[in-house]
Image (cartoon, grey):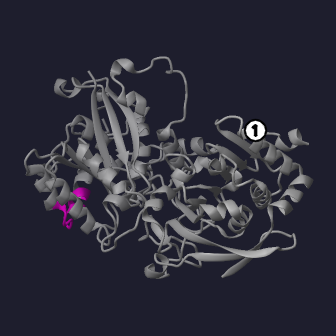
Amino acid sequence: MRKVVSTDNPPDAEASIAFRRLHYGKLADAVTGVVPPSEGYRVTRRTMDLDPELEGRLSPARLIGRRRFELDVVAPPARGLGCFVARMASADAMAMLRARFRPEDGENGGARLHHQSSVWVAAAEDWRRFPAACLSIAARQLRADPDPVDEAETTRLAEAPTRWRFRWITPDQAGSVLARASWGRAILEHFTTALESNDDAPLTFGSSDFASENDFLAAVGFALLYLPASYPRWDEISVVCGLEHPLPGVCLRYVSNVATDAALSAAA
Amino acid sequence: MTEKSTICLIGPKASGKSSLLASLTECVAQGAFGYSPRLRPALQPVTEGDFRAAATEIRPADFLAHEEGDYERLKRDFALGGVATDTLDTYEYYFRLTVNGEAPPAIVTPGPWLLEIVDSAGEIAVPPDGAEIPILNDVKTKLARQLLASEAVVLVLPLVRLEDSAWIGALTRFIDRLALAPDKKLRRLVVVFSQYERLFVRLGPSAFTYACDPAVAWHVLRKSLRAAQWLERLRALETGDGGASVRFTVASSYGFTKRFQNPNIDPHQPGERRFRRASLEEARASNEYWRPFLTAEPFLYAALGLDSAFTFSFAQLDARAPEKPAASILA
């Protein structure tokens, strides 16, 4: 069991979340990161009790809302780490994706690129109750790195769910943080505006709003924690970093190099 | 009259399927094929909508508009060094082929042709032997359906290091299944040995001259096929009920450099990169020296059924000496 502290606020209680993992891409040498010539695309890691019906919904292309995961869907500043998506994958499950392209001859290589992605799945209920913790854990731990080629297949394809313990804060505590921050008002107003119609409601932030992707994910985590469970468009909410396009529904997006929707200045 | 045709690109991973496709239009545009220059084929990417629509429904209003389609993205990725095609789906590309020059009437009359070329990862149809590879999504079913509905298959095999390839068993099984499939539409199958330029890396400026000789390609194919266990299975495909015509050829997506004539692989670049001028932007930098070699051959034969100086039948390969070609790239 691993531990993540998701906030600086005093803890009220401890909770835990279980993530099921699905990695897709190629296996690589653990030290050099080089993909051996014999290795091809495959599911490289899978939690043993991952629902096979759900698995079809966890395709990286499907999660990013495109027919194909291509080089130009990831914004240039995010190409090293990869893009990030958190969204509902089914009525009962939420998925978080990190996906990127990397050279087959190691991180700084010049060979052709291959797709590498990691998907973590949590129960929809956990996502609604602990969004800040989900995003905080993902910000620190979810990486699209190849699994080691020397790890036994029986281990990689039959692992147990990973469980994370964390200290969580209450919605009221999140509300007090939001009230003090300009981004808090901007996001909450966006949630309100999104209720006025069923149209897609993207809101894009850039580096002028948040210094890093982690800061953005922490902020969105607070906002989602404050959002009532009865919010009608909860299941349409997606949190996206480094994607060149927003997702359908209510999409909060961070791309460091784009002109933002001037959300913070409008809210100020 | 317009004829529609579906061509499936099949082969082991990293054999150069997507590269072959990415260099197709450039090869046609540069006339770097073994057909007579008087054939004057033209090939342009079109949208899926244009492929599906009847000829009369194709919108004329957008002909000046430029929209980056899937094929342009494939070409751009190829210019940047290439991206391994994933197994999440199969990927279709659409083209309009016309023949504007001299060709036998029986060949030209059905044209122009609307082509659907299906690209797929090698792990799907020809996975490494002895391993059950878990992939995401049921893409195998989709590819099988596309194969049975296709009029032609282009089988891409890497020319070098055939002897230690882990995919030979899977390839043999694939050919067997294709031959036995009762409801297939297959009319033509082209086996392409890719990476042809690598045979000539020590020949410097003479490389292109030797590569342009169909007799050299004939010898290379005969030698490469000598130990191929799957060759007899292919004969069965040709001789069975409703047999498909089988051809063998060679191709090079990187090709040979313009002016200098040497194989277009820069030994000073990391990975495998074409020669480029450092002062230019990425795509232009590579295109200055880029002349793909014979990558149009398999697709033109698959669509037209027209032989070039570099397409060889079983009978030609079985012969003791190469027949004198009817046309040559040197013409």
Left/right placement of residue A266 relative to residue A132 reads: right
Q: Which residue is mark 1?
A: A193
Task: Give the quarter of the figure containing the C terminus of chain A.
Answer: top right
Closer to us: B195 or B122: B122
Give the camera-side residue of A97 and B186: A97
* Above/below status of B135 relative to A148: above
Camera-side residue: B256 or B238?
B238
Q: Quadrant of residue A18?
A: bottom right
The residue lying at 42 percent from left, 30 percent from top is B49
Disc 1 residue type?
Answer: Thr
| Place of residue B144 in the rendered image (x, y in percent of width and height, measured from the top left) | 28, 52
Residue A17 in the image: state x and y as whole percent.
65, 72
**Residue at (55%, 70%) from the top-left corner?**
A20
Residue B16 vs residue A104: left or right?
left
For the N terminus of chain A, the quadrant is: bottom right
The magenta-colored residue range is B220-231
Label 1 crowd bin: few (<14), some (14–19), many (20+), radius 10 Å: few
The count of marks equals: 1
Dot 1 falls on a residue whose secondary structure is: helix
- Tell me: B109 left or right of A156: left
Residue at 53% of width from left, 65% of height from top? A104
Q: Position of residue A190 (x, y in %)?
A: 77, 42
Visible in this render: residue B311? no
In magenta segment, residue A56: no
Residue A239 visible in this rendered orientation of the protein: yes
Q: Chain of mark 1?
A: A
**Residue B217 or residue A70, whichever sits in front:** A70
The residue located at (48%, 40%) in the rendering is B70
Residue B50 location in percent, x, y? 40, 27
